[in-house]
């Protein structure tokens, strides 16, 4: 007669073998792509998630640089201006943007040639930055918004920066997507 412990071990071994044979198993965590953000519940739908890259991404860093990328697939018409909305939590945790150090660059990753800007307006109370290029940004163009001299918030966290654009021929701006930024992660 088999002991109860031996029976339990055999049952567990049989269950493990059956699980492996059927292909059903426990899902192990997989690494996420760099700077894409981690979503457990809710979050930004994949079709609206925008890519980004950050230099010097540590809490309270005074010289962080954000590269906010916009893919050509999001630029369906010429863009006259765009608006970036940043969350209250960014400034509540002592994050700060330098509005004199914002550029638009053609291309992707960290960008290339600088696109001249007519104006950058900061609506501090509503957490918005409105950027108007000198000439409309053509449809099907990759571009990067570069924010330099950023003071990161004083502790780690996710901050959602939203992008709305005023396309040529539109009366109201359209939501383009969100950068789910993981700040203070180094």
Image (cartoon, rainbow, N blue to C red):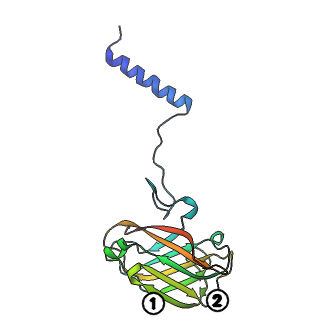
Q: In the rendered view of the protein, which quadrant contains the N terminus?
A: top left
- Nearer to us in this view, 136 or 144: 136
Q: Position of residue 34 (x, y in %)?
A: 50, 63
Q: Residue at x 49, y 71 (%)?
A: 162
Which marked residue is nearer to the observer: mark 2 or mark 1? 2
Left or right: 78 as drawn, with respect to 125: right
Residue linked to disc 2? 135
Q: Residues within 10 Å of mark 2 (few under 14, many from 20)?
A: some
Left or right: 136 as drawn, with respect to 12: right
- Tell me whether circle 2 and circle 1 mark residues in contact (CB < 8 Å): no
Residue at disc 1, secondary structure: loop
Q: Position of residue 89 (x, y in %)?
A: 35, 71
Where 141 sits versus 29, above or below?
below
Quarter location, residue 60: bottom left
Residue at the top extreme, as displayed: 1
Residue 54 seen by the camera: yes
- Nearer to us in this view, 112 or 73: 73
Q: Residue at x 50, y 61 (%)?
A: 44
């Amino acid at each position: 007669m088999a002991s109860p412990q031996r029976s339990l071990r055999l049952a567990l071994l049989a269950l493990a073998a059956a699980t492996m044979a059927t292909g059903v198993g426990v899902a192990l965590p997989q690494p996420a792509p760099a700077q894409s953000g981690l979503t457990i519940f809710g979050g930004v739908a994949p079709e609206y998630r925008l890519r980004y890259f950050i230099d010097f991404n540590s809490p309270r860093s005074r010289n962080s640089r954000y590269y906010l990328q916009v893919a050509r697939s999001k630029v369906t018409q010429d863009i006259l201006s765009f608006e970036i909305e940043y969350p209250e939590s960014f400034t509540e945790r002592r994050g700060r943007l330098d509005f004199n150090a914002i550029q638009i660059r053609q291309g992707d990753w960290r960008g290339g040639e600088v696109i001249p800007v007519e104006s950058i307006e900061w609506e501090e109370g509503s957490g918005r930055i409105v950027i108007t290029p000198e000439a409309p940004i053509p449809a099907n163009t990759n571009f990067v918004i570069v924010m330099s001299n950023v003071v990161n918030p004083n502790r780690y966290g996710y901050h959602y920066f939203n992008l709305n654009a005023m396309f040529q021929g539109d009366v109201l701006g359209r939501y383009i997507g969100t950068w789910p930024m993981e700040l203070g992660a180094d």
